[in-house]
Structures are given as structure tokens and as C-alpha cells.
Image: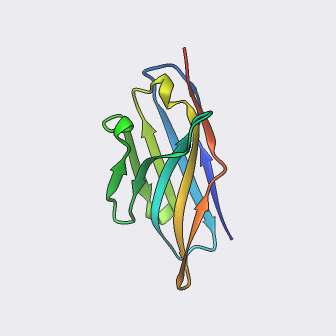
Amino acid sequence: QVQLVESGGGLVQPGGSLRLSCIASGSIFSINNMGWYRQAPGKQRELVARITRRGSTTYADSVKGRFTISRDNAKNTVYLQMNSLKPEDTAVYSCNADVINGLKTYNYWGQGTQVTVSS
């Protein structure tokens, strides 16, 4: 099995920064897409950013220019650098990964980490 473990969430003031990390461990041959999603109270989960194995990135319009996604393939880790945080960024942020094991690709989710932006 594969586990995704996020870290780096917390409470930050508006305009501040946080860096989220997600480490994948277990039975992993390779990982294709990795991404960050978020879900605020009363709202649907939404894509924040996604990165391919080769480093191509996609961002939600609401975070473009403020958030940066990156990954370290050797460490099976994906990062989300969040700058200029706004109260509306408050949500549970979850890591997602497409893990290749054998001839199949499996999709996994982390347990989520809370990000709260408030003064």
C-alpha cells in the first residue's frame, strides 16, 4: 500500500507564507501527477495546483502568482509554497498522487492538513 503524509499547515496572518510538504511512501515504482487540493467549510473540494513528473504545472486562477508547486522525484515528495496568503485560502489542503505499481496506476489521497489564514 501507499501512504501520503502532509505537513506544514497551521495558522498564519494575512500576507504571510506557509510551505506544505507531502511525502509518499510504500509500494511505489513511480509517480505521475501529484497535486494539492483544498476544501473549505461548506464548499466543494477544488484543485489548487498540479505537477507532472516532468515538472509541468497547472494552477487554479485564484492562486496564480502566489502559490508554487514543486516536487522531488527522488524523495517522492511534492511541495506547495504559499505566499501572500488571504483569509479565503483557509481550508484543509490534501495531497493527491497517481502512483504506478506494476502495470497499473492507482490514485491516493493524504489525510489533509489545516491551513488557517486569520489575524
What residue lies at 58% left-to-right and 73% top-to-bottom? 28
Estimate the x, y position of residue 33 in percent, counting from the top left.
Answer: 44, 63
Whether 112 is drawn above or below 87: the answer is: below
Estimate the x, y position of residue 107 in percent, counting from the top left.
Answer: 57, 66
| Colour basis | rainbow
What residue lies at 45% left-to-right and 24% top-to-bottom? 86
For the N terminus, the quadrant is bottom right
Whether 39 is drawn above or below 27: the answer is: above
Q: Is residue 116 left or right of residue 51?
A: right
Q: Nearer the viewer, residue 35 or 43?
A: 43
For the C terminus, the quadrant is top right
How many labels, in total?
Answer: 0
What residue lies at 54% left-to-right and 42% top-to-bottom? 38
What residue lies at 49% left-to-right and 31% top-to-bottom? 89
Please indicate, yes or no, whether residue 14 appears anywhere in the rendered image: yes
Q: Is residue 34 left or right of residue 67?
A: right
Q: Nearer the viewer, residue 98 or 73?
A: 98
Estimate the x, y position of residue 63 in percent, counting from the top left.
Answer: 38, 37
Residue furthest top in the image: 119
Q: Is residue 114 left or right of residue 100?
A: right
Please indicate, yes or no, whether residue 8 appears anywhere in the rendered image: no
Q: Which quarter of the figure has residue 8? A: top right
Q: Which quarter of the figure has residue 106? A: bottom right
